[in-house]
């Protein structure tokens, strides 16, 4: 199997998770948890597909997906920022609700063929060896997803606004002192994050997994996206790596499946999911007390090495994630 | 920039935090503001820096009345504040902290700003590595960064809130030199502190805040006695040591070193005997809480040993200390002591020492009723504790103490209580002491410290002086709290 | 993260608000139906008749009620301690797995009543074990219980697929329709004519009553409540935090595991183990308990009501080409509405306080 084609196919399958992960990273960077991802992705996928079908315009589908994603996020923002209800409760209820809504409203459109994102290789660049196949021989959404990674990264680390976003979730009191409207910005970023999640959902139904069905087949992906955000340490590049890693796992599983026809097919899709706990465990357990005591047992040199590897792996959330900001 | 505060009033419900404050800070001066905790200092600072709006009163800058409703607006007028725990972003780098909030720019230009940072820092003999994360800096360095940033933002009145609490002596000297230089540049400094010696060293004028008002002002140099009088009041208190007879050693601290994010208590040793009552004096955050927490088993000493009844308890769990007979009562009533949402009966049921499987509600109610009477709590057994007033919550906390402990550790046991309640509480505590309990308590009331204890420990920036109650009076104690006798 | 849910009192304004919330939820669902191209009244009527239309249908509702009751009882414990046991689905599955295992191993060697009893115990044990894993991950691995629970849900699901297609597969066929069904001797006995086993419903009701007693009348229950309201104060009072939280996870998991056993051996069951056997009952119970505002008393009728909606909305797919998830939409809207009115009420209180 040609390696560049393999990598290209991984890139082609990644935009949905990438957008969702980037969107949620932004939302959580601002200090809000949008737990409804699993449901939002389903609902936005369905709506994106239906709108694209009815208007015969893929772009309209994507816009619809983004609007719905932002709407869902606005409920979370309202419940948590204005009504001070626990974010976990709202997010959980919305996960189930959006999924059910998707099934109900999408029912008439199941197994209906619809418009797809057109394959648009970039002339001349697509012919470059290796790099061309991977990066330039794709469709607009893939290009957008790559730009999104760079865009989010640049925004966060190269602009004042992005810096302020980092400060927002880290220490809202200090952000407030520097002139940031904490509540207002949290609303805005939650909505932006939701819109990106909607983009991810629409990328499923208009590109990676065309159409709609019940069950759609991507159930559980939203939870994985949430885990990837944690694994990614709330940083766009690392989160993107996590997303690509997960998609690679799925691709690997598919290949494995074709190599092992005796093992039943249903076993495979479930495999990448349990790996999630292990990775999460790996990136959070370094902070525990028993781990520190465990490490103290090792001789100095080895201890330093272990500590350093653990430290680079460890992630800790924006310090003010999920908390309520009170001015006084 | 000359700043005047005229008749500033600020209420929090029935509490008058600021009760008609009049203050005038001349341009280019190094003005000190002295005061104890609870004097209204932090409220006044919040008003001045824009976090709070005063209920009444006006603020004038260079003779012009101004009003602002947020710290940003205050900063736009030139008023900036350095908090005790600097309001920075530990997870971000030094340069990012410096940059964040720079108005009028879209793109971040670290290269250009780096030079600016180093330049400004050099002016005051500060040194930063721009790429280090702020969480790796010491408090002193974080302060320096914040000062430099405020200067860059164009601050004219710099308020410093207890800046020297957690910094080293060298950092303090650097800070003072920087402050002096700033006044030479025409900036005005308001130095809020409780440390008498430092205020004397640095400031050219001092105002004292007590009970929500400015009780006096003084041009430096000014004798320490006068300052102490203004801070603590005229009461001539003479030390009256406790008469409870002492027994054998119950608590033995040897060469204890404790630290938290702010300060370090080093090489501290103490022997406490049964029946002994020891008062811990000193301003908040000077180390008393650390010592109490260590004696309760809540924090692990970095070095040294803790022995209770000759048993080495160093490093054991909190529950082990509980079993050994240590009782710890916190100052944070609702945050750490009581459970909001549960009633008095439920609390008494919870602390039942030998509970059966099923809760004996009738017994719990009986006990609750008893304690309500004993401790004069204004509330019913079925009242959820968050509905009680502060004073009654304090009484509830006290009523939940077990009837007998080996060692009783209390933070501000009589805070918020009137005279009568304080008397009756101390009656109860003395009873326990007579039965052999050793008591260590923190307090900010000089008379409580001097009339109830055998000995008083004064804490100042992590250093400790042991005073025999019968050898010290109120003035000396006040001075000690302010830092006298700790210079070395 | 702040997990605690604010509790309502019982004054008239609150009742009015609650009724308003319910009304809003139904109106929104009706509007949704219009968008989906169906008549709301027709759909609601269909759900109602689908649940209560005949005694057979009512029996189905009651058999769905039992696992939801059991899970709700368990969740009352974890919510009391301020924990979000999202892993409940996996705990139900593991209960079913353990129960199936015992039943398969013993079905020919012991009298059926014993087999069922042992299977129930095994189900409880399996669910409790799974619950403790989630708790352990949280307490010792610093893994948030939501993700730990989710991951364990996935693992339980994968395990089931593996068992159903592997060691426990039906002779010859081996499909995801499940394991070889158990003979009627191993089914929970039902009433004649009314296809419900008294055992499963009674179990659910007894569970709720027991849990209510434990939470309100025992020392452990009081400690859990303290942990849920203020972890710091609870710790300072000397409550053994890790022990109690693990206990909560284990107890909830155990009850969920019992629900899993009911799903295998009970009257509504297909009497075998199949993937997704938990049928979302665990998550449904979370909605029930949220809607009931953590009240044991209210969990009983609300779980019945939700079970009715689940069963009734099955008719929608059969008779009207509407997706049965409409039931889920109604349930979700109800909980969201209630959360919103709760929030509005406390917001108004806060404004007044200022």
Image: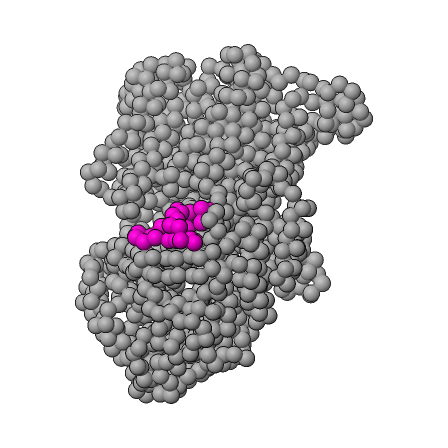
The structure residue drawn at horizontal position 20% and vertical position 41%, both measured from the top left corner, is: C11
Give A198 or B344, whichever is nearer the viewer.
Answer: A198
Give B68 or B12, whichever is nearer the viewer.
Answer: B68
What percent of the width, then of the height, locates residue C79? 37, 46
Q: Is residue C224 left or right of residue C145?
A: left
Part of the protein shown in magenta: B49-74
How is the structure coloured here?
A: one colour
Asked whether residue B383 is drawn in magenta, I would say no
Residue A235 found in image quarter: top right
Q: In the picture shown, does residue B423 fall above or below C140?
A: below
Q: Is residue A30 left or right of residue B473?
A: right
Give B161 or A221, whichever is nearer the viewer.
Answer: B161
What percent of the width, then of the height, locates residue B258? 52, 71
Quadrant for the N terminus of chain A in the image: top right
Q: Is residue A48 left or right of residue C118?
A: right
Q: In the picture shown, does residue B307 fall above or below C311?
A: below
Q: In the picture shown, does residue B373 fall above or below A27?
A: below
Residue B223 found in image quarter: bottom left
The structure residue drawn at horizontal position 38% and vertical position 88%, both measured from the top left corner, is: B471
Query: Is residue A61 in sight in this rendering?
Result: yes
Q: Find the residue positioned furthest to the front.
A: B63
Residue A119 found in image quarter: top right
What percent of the width, then of the height, locates residue B113? 64, 48
Asked whether residue B62 is drawn in magenta, I would say yes
The structure residue drawn at horizontal position 37% and vertical position 53%, both measured from the top left corner, is: B59
The structure residue drawn at horizontal position 55% and vertical position 21%, both measured from the top left corner, is: A62
Q: In the picture shown, does residue A222 fall above or below B292?
A: above
Give A188 or C45, whichever is nearer the viewer.
Answer: A188
What percent of the width, then of the height, locates residue B322? 40, 70
Q: Is residue C252 left or right of residue A293?
A: left
């Amino acid at each position: 199997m040609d390696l560049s084609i393999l990598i290209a196919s991984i890139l082609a399958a990644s935009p949905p998770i990438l957008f969702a992960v980037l969107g949620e990273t932004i939302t959580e960077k601002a200090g809000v948890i949008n737990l409804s991802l699993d449901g939002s992705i389903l609902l936005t996928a369905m709506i994106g597909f239906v709108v694209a079908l009815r208007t015969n315009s893929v772009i309209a589908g994507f816009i619809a997906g983004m609007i719905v994603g932002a709407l869902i996020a606005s409920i979370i923002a309202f419940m948590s920022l204005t009504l001070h209800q626990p974010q976990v409760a709202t997010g959980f209820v919305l996960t189930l609700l959006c999924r059910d809504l998707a099934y109900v409203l999408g029912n008439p459109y199941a197994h209906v063929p619809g418009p797809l994102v057109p394959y648009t290789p970039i002339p001349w660049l697509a012919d470059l060896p290796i790099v061309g196949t991977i990066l330039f021989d794709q469709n607009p959404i893939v290009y957008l997803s790559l730009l999104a990674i760079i865009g989010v990264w640049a925004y966060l680390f190269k602009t004042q606004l992005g810096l302020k976003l980092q400060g927002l979730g880290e220490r809202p009191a200090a952000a407030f002192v520097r002139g940031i409207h904490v509540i207002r910005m949290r609303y805005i970023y939650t909505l932006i994050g939701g819109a990106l999640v909607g983009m991810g959902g629409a990328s499923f139904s208009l590109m990676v997994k065309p159409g709609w069905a019940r069950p759609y087949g991507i159930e559980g992906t939203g939870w994985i996206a949430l885990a990837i955000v944690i694994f990614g340490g709330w940083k766009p590049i690392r989160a993107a790596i996590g997303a690509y890693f997960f998609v690679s796992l799925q691709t690997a599983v598919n290949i494995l499946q074709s190599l092992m026809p005796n093992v039943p097919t249903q076993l495979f899709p479930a495999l990448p999911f349990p790996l999630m706990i292990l990775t999460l465990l790996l990136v959070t357990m370094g902070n525990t007390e028993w781990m520190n005591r465990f490490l103290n047992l090792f001789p100095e040199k080895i201890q330093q090495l272990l500590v350093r590897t653990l430290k680079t792996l460890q992630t800790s959330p924006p310090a003010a994630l999920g908390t309520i900001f009170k001015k006084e | 920039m000359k700043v005047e505060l005229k008749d500033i009033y600020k209420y929090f419900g029935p509490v008058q935090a600021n009760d008609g404050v009049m203050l005038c800070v001349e341009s280019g001066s190094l003005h000190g503001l002295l005061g104890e905790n609870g004097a209204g200092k932090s409220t006044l600072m919040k008003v001045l820096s824009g976090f709070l709006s005063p209920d009444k009163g006006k603020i004038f800058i260079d003779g012009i009345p101004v009003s602002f409703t947020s710290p940003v607006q205050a900063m736009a007028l030139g008023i900036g504040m350095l908090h005790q725990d600097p309001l920075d972003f530990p997870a971000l780098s030094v340069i990012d902290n410096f940059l964040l909030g720079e108005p009028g720019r879209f793109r971040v230009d670290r290269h250009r700003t780096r030079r600016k940072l180093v330049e400004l820092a050099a002016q005051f003999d500060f040194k930063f590595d721009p790429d280090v994360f702020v969480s790796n800096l010491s408090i002193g360095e974080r302060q320096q960064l914040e000062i430099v940033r405020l200067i860059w933002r164009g601050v004219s009145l710099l308020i410093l809130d207890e800046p020297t609490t957690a910094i080293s002596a060298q950092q303090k000297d650097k800070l003072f030199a920087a402050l002096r230089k700033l006044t030479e540049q025409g900036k005005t400094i308001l130095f809020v502190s409780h440390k008498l010696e430092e205020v004397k060293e640095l400031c050219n004028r001092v105002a004292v805040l007590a009970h929500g008002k400015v009780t006096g002002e003084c041009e430096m140099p000014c004798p320490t006695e006068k300052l102490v009088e203004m801070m603590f009041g005229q009461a001539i208190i003479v030390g009256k040591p406790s008469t409870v007879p002492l027994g054998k050693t119950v608590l033995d601290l040897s060469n204890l070193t404790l630290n938290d994010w702010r300060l370090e208590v080093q090489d501290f040793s103490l022997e406490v005997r049964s029946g002994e009552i020891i008062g811990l004096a000193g301003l908040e955050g000077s180390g008393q809480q650390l010592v109490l927490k260590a004696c309760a088993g809540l924090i692990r000493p970095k070095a040294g040993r803790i022995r209770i009844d000759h048993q080495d308890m160093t490093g054991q769990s909190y529950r082990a200390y509980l079993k050994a007979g240590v009782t710890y009562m916190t100052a944070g009533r609702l945050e750490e002591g009581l459970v909001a949402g549960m009633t008095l009966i439920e609390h008494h049921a919870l602390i039942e020492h030998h509970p059966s499987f099923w809760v004996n509600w009738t017994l719990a109610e009986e006990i609750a009723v008893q304690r309500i009477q004993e401790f004069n709590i204004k509330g019913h057994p079925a009242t959820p504790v968050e509905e009680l007033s502060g004073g009654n919550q304090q009484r509830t906390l006290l009523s939940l103490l077990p009837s007998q402990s080996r060692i009783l550790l209390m933070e501000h046991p009589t805070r918020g209580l009137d005279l009568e309640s304080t008397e009756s509480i101390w009656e109860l505590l003395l009873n326990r002491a007579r039965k052999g309990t050793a008591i260590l308590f923190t307090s900010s009331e000089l008379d409580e410290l001097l009339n109830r204890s055998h000995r008083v420990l004064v804490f100042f920036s992590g250093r400790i002086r042991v005073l025999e109650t019968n050898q010290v009076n109120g003035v000396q104690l006040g001075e000690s709290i302010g830092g006298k006798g700790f210079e070395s | 993260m702040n997990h605690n849910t604010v509790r309502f009192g019982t004054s008239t304004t609150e009742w009015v608000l609650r009724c308003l919330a319910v009304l809003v939820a139904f109106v929104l669902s009706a509007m949704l139906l219009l968008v989906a191209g169906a008549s709301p009244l027709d759909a609601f009527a269909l759900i109602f008749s689908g649940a209560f239309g005949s005694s057979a249908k009512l029996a189905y509702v009651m058999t769905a009620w039992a696992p939801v009751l059991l899970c709700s009882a368990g969740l009352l414990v974890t919510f009391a301690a301020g924990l979000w046991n999202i892993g409940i689905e996996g705990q139900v599955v593991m209960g079913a797995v353990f129960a199936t295992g015992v039943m398969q191993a013993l079905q020919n060697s012991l009298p059926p009543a014993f087999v069922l009893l042992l299977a129930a115990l095994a189900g409880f044990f399996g669910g409790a074990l799974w619950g403790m894993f989630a708790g352990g991950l949280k307490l010792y691995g610093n893994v948030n219980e939501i993700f730990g629970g989710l991951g364990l849900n996935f693992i339980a699901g994968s395990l089931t697929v593996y068992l159903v297609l592997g060691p426990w597969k039906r002779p010859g066929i081996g499909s995801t329709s499940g394991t070889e069904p158990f003979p009627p001797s191993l089914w929970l006995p039902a009433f004649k004519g009314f296809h419900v086993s008294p055992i499963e419903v009674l179990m659910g009701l007894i569970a709720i009553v027991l849990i209510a007693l434990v939470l309100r009348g025992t020392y452990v229950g009081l400690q859990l409540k303290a942990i849920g309201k203020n972890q710091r104060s609870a710790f300072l009072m000397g409550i053994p935090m890790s022990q109690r939280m693990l206990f909560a996870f284990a107890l909830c998991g155990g009850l969920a595991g019992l629900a899993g056993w009911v799903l295998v051996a009970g009257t509504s069951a297909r009497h075998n183990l199949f993937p997704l056997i938990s049928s979302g009952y665990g998550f449904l119970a979370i909605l029930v308990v949220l809607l009931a505002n953590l009240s044991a008393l209210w969990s009983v009728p609300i779980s019945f009501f939700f079970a009715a909606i689940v069963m009734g909305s099955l008719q929608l797919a059969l008779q009207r080409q509407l997706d049965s998830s409409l039931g889920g939409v109604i349930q979700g809207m109800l909980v969201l509405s209630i959360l919103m009115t709760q929030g509005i009420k406390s917001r108004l209180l806060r404004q007044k306080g200022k």
